[in-house]
């Protein structure tokens, strides 16, 4: 069976330890976590986790079934089975002597990323997009010297209703 | 939303408990447990549960048994739960008290045993400071509990207890932990008890999909060589009568897994025994040659399937289980029936018809006659299998038998024949040494009128032998059997067969004199080294009203057969030289 990337949306009770319950389940059962994000959902008391994982159909079925066994898990959806919007945010602090800045700004603008801070020798770039776009942005900035990089992991949602 | 009926049936007590008094968290805990119908709690006090034990002191309604180790307490609660079908309860203090429960919690989790485990914790203000006797027990036990709670407000205690009992005892059962910080157990609030349960993320599937049940019946209709693999789920669901009816109607030969023993009467002609690593010849051959395998409340453990790729190669597999995650986890399943085993079988029984299995049954019956379980008996040695057979015959198969883990466990599964559910108590999934004896204490507490026999090896007996004190003090009449071969027998067997006789650290010849050990605690001790002594000692044990330990010094070199080596398929059995 094909091992493919899956984006799973998990609605959970906003209880202390719920992230640990879910994350440790992945570890214990030998499931892979490529990215994990968690934040409040549209409903008070519930959070939504987005986990990017890889596996074949059998593994995906097991992930879903095992997640449902966690009492604080309310709903599990493999949203990558549908048309979806997937976004990740990265902040990249890159070496930028004043002389080189226009060049970097040119790169950033092409990607529709933004400059969110300028220091004496560096600038901070914010890029939002799917993981591929973030990766491409990072690759392009690497030659200038990336000082620090932080990525959020993926937030995602099914398109339409 | 479901409503769980409270089990406190005594009206007077119920009225007393339900008073809206302003009381401490500890008193709320006790009242809540009593309202859940708890009649025996196993525990061990310590700093963080002092308020709770203060509340227990002088409470005439609350029955608490002090074990000598927290591990004894939780295995006892486990034995209580397995033998009665009720939720087992134990209490331990924070830190080491709580961590001493870990083995028992994992044991219960692997075997789907309903437990509510109450631990104290340090003051809520001190949590996270590495305070004295602090341990993050909810964190530690997260992978081995069905659910867990850290109570942060005294107002939550009664609701938490009610939820915990509901979660532990419904769906696929399991242990639930409630961690209560010391200050929370001391805070006061008005007692309320709400009978309603509403847990949004928890709705076990009880009723099966009718179409799947119909597919199952159609598959039975088409099958020539069907076999049932009945597991612990049959016992836990209380579905033994439904299973018997199903087998009677469908005429399908039935195999019981280690934990399924007792879920189907071994006296029934269609019973083929236990499958897997030490399964019977016929059970293993039946699985390998069947064309339809119906797993019922069985999770296809690797000790059953052995090499999965070669397991039941010709069979269409149907799987009835309350836990959807078990369906398709290990083996590819053609017909999934998710639901309570009892409910699924009830539905199936409405339309179940006999399979075309006459020739198949004949073939298996012939096999059963040709390859029965057997051992080489002689009059020089006391054979362990003989001891088990003797216990079976003298108790007429009516005792509750608990075992520890190892060779004696397999011999007990093979040579003691069970006809009733909840009479066979053993650690299957985790294989916990030290389990059997304290579990017997729990089983006896839950079944004061039944004969409880605890069968142990000389290794496992030493892992919780301190609980002999409980038997002596409370005159708990467990008959404690030690199958003593002065060696870690199952490890020896593996080292012999798989590791080329390289016996590494298995010699238990420095064990205590078990008779003297029993006597040191005030328990009667007896010893037998041959058949005659064995019969005499065992009869004396049966005739003695209180607890008795019998040290059966058996033939050292006996091995458990049949045996399937890891990496082999289940029909590649070593049959021994018997």
Image: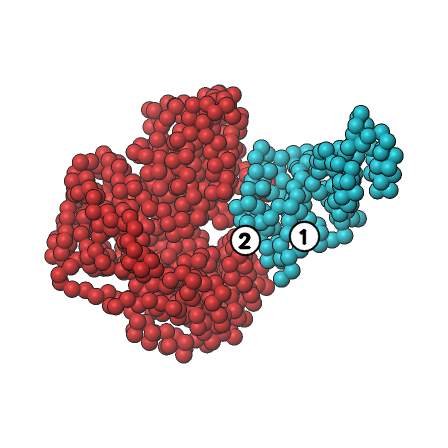
Where disc 1 sits, the SS reads: strand
Left or right of B481 on screen, residue B94: right
Can residue B444 be seen by looking at this rendering? Answer: no
Label drawn at residue A5: 1
Where disc 2 sits, the SS reads: helix
Q: Position of residue A11 (x, y in %)?
A: 65, 42
Q: Position of residue B124 (x, y in %)?
A: 51, 23
Disc 2: which chain?
A: B
Query: Are discs 2 and 1 located on one and the same chain?
Result: no
Tell me the distance, in whole angstroms, between the alpha carbons under discs 2 and 1.
21 Å
Q: Position of residue B561 (x, y in %)?
A: 30, 63
Left or right of B152 on screen, residue B475: left
Q: Is residue A42 above or below residue B563?
A: above
Can residue B332 be seen by looking at this rendering? Answer: yes
Q: In the rendered image of this protein, which colour is used for chain A? A: cyan
Q: Is residue B181 above or below residue B236?
A: above
Q: Position of residue B226 (x, y in %)?
A: 46, 71
Q: Is residue B498 above or below residue A10?
A: below
Q: Residue at x 50, y 42 (%)?
A: B143
Residue marked by disc 2:
B325
Whether tag 2 and tag 1 are in contact, CB under 8 A, the answer is no
Q: Residues within 10 Å of mark 1 (few under 14, many from 20)?
A: some
Q: Hey, which residue is sitting farthest bottom in the picture? A: B359
Disc 1: which chain?
A: A
Q: In the rendered image of this protein, which colour is used for chain B? A: red
Q: Residue at x 32, y 44 (%)?
A: B434
Q: Residue at x 24, y 44 (%)?
A: B478
Label drawn at residue A63: none
């Amino acid at each position: 069976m094909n091992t493919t990337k899956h984006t799973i949306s998990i609605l959970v009770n906003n209880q202390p330890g719920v992230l640990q319950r879910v994350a440790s389940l992945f570890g214990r059962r030998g499931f892979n976590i490529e990215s994990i994000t968690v934040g409040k959902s549209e409903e008070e008391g519930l959070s939504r986790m987005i986990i990017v994982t890889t596996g074949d159909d059998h593994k995906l079925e097991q992930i879903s079934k095992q997640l449902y066994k966690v009492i604080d898990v309310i709903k599990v959806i493999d949203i990558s089975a549908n048309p979806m919007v997937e976004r990740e945010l990265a902040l990249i602090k890159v070496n930028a002597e004043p002389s080189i800045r226009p060049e970097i700004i040119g790169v950033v603008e092409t990607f529709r990323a933004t400059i969110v801070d300028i220091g004496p020798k560096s600038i901070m770039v914010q890029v939002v997009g799917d993981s591929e776009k973030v990766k491409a942005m990072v690759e392009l900035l690497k030659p200038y010297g990336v000082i620090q990089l932080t990525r959020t992991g993926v937030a995602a949602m099914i398109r339409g209703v | 939303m479901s409503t769980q009926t409270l089990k406190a049936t005594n009206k007077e007590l119920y009225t007393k408990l339900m008073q809206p008094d302003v009381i401490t968290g500890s008193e709320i805990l006790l009242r809540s447990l009593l309202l859940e119908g708890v009649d025996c709690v196993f525990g061990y006090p310590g700093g963080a549960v002092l308020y709770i034990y203060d509340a227990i002191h002088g409470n005439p309604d609350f029955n608490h048994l002090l074990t000598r180790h927290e591990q004894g307490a939780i295995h006892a609660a486990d034995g209580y739960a397995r033998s009665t079908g009720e939720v087992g309860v134990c209490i331990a203090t924070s830190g080491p008290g709580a961590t001493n429960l870990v083995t028992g919690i994992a044991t219960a989790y692997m075997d789907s045993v309903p437990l509510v485990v109450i631990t104290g914790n340090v003051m809520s203000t001190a949590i996270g400071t590495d305070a004295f006797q602090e341990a993050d027990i909810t964190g530690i036990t997260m992978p081995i509990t069905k659910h867990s709670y850290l109570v942060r407000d005294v107002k939550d205690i009664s609701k938490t207890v009610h939820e915990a009992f509901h979660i532990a005892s419904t769906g696929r059962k399991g242990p639930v932990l409630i961690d209560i910080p010391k200050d929370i157990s001391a805070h006061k609030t008005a007692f309320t008890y709400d009978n309603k349960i509403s847990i949004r993320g928890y709705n076990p599937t009880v009723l099966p999909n009718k179409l799947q049940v119909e597919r199952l019946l159609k598959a039975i209709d088409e099958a020539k060589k069907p076999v049932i693999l009945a597991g612990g789920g049959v016992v836990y669901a209380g579905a033994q009568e439904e299973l018997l009816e199903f087998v009677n109607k469908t005429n399908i030969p039935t195999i019981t897994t280690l934990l399924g023993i007792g879920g189907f009467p071994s006296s029934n002609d269609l019973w083929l025994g236990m499958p897997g690593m030490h399964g019977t010849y016929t059970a293993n051959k039946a699985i390998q040659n069947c064309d339809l395998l119906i797993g019922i409340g069985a999770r296809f453990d690797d000790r059953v399937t052995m090499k999965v790729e070669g397991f039941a190669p010709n069979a269409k597999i149907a799987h009835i289980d309350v836990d959807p995650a078990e369906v398709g986890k290990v083996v590819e399943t053609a017909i999934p029936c998710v639901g309570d085993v009892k409910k699924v079988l009830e539905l199936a029984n409405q339309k179940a018809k006999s399979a075309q299995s006459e020739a198949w049954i004949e073939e298996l019956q012939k096999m059963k006659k040709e390859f029965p379980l057997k051992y080489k008996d002689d009059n020089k040695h006391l054979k362990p299998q003989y001891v088990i057979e003797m216990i079976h015959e003298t108790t007429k198969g009516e005792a509750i038998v608990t075992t520890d883990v190892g060779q004696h466990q397999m011999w007990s599964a093979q040579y003691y024949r069970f006809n009733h559910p909840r009479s066979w108590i053993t650690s299957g999934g985790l294989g916990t040494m030290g389990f059997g004896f304290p579990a017997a204490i729990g089983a006896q507490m839950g079944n004061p009128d039944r004969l409880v026999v605890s069968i142990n090896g000389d290794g496992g007996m030493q892992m919780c032998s301190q609980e002999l004190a409980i038997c002596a003090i409370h005159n708990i009449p467990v008959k404690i059997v030690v199958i003593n071969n002065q060696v870690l027998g199952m490890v020896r067997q593996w080292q012999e067969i798989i590791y080329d006789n390289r016996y590494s650290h298995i010699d238990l010849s420095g064990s205590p004199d078990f008779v003297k050990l029993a006597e040191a605690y005030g328990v009667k001790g007896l010893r037998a080294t041959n058949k005659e002594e064995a019969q005499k000692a065992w009869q004396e044990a049966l005739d003695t009203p209180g607890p008795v330990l019998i040290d059966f010094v058996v033939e050292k070199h006996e091995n458990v057969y049949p045996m399937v080596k890891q990496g082999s398929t289940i029909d590649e059995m070593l049959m021994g030289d018997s």
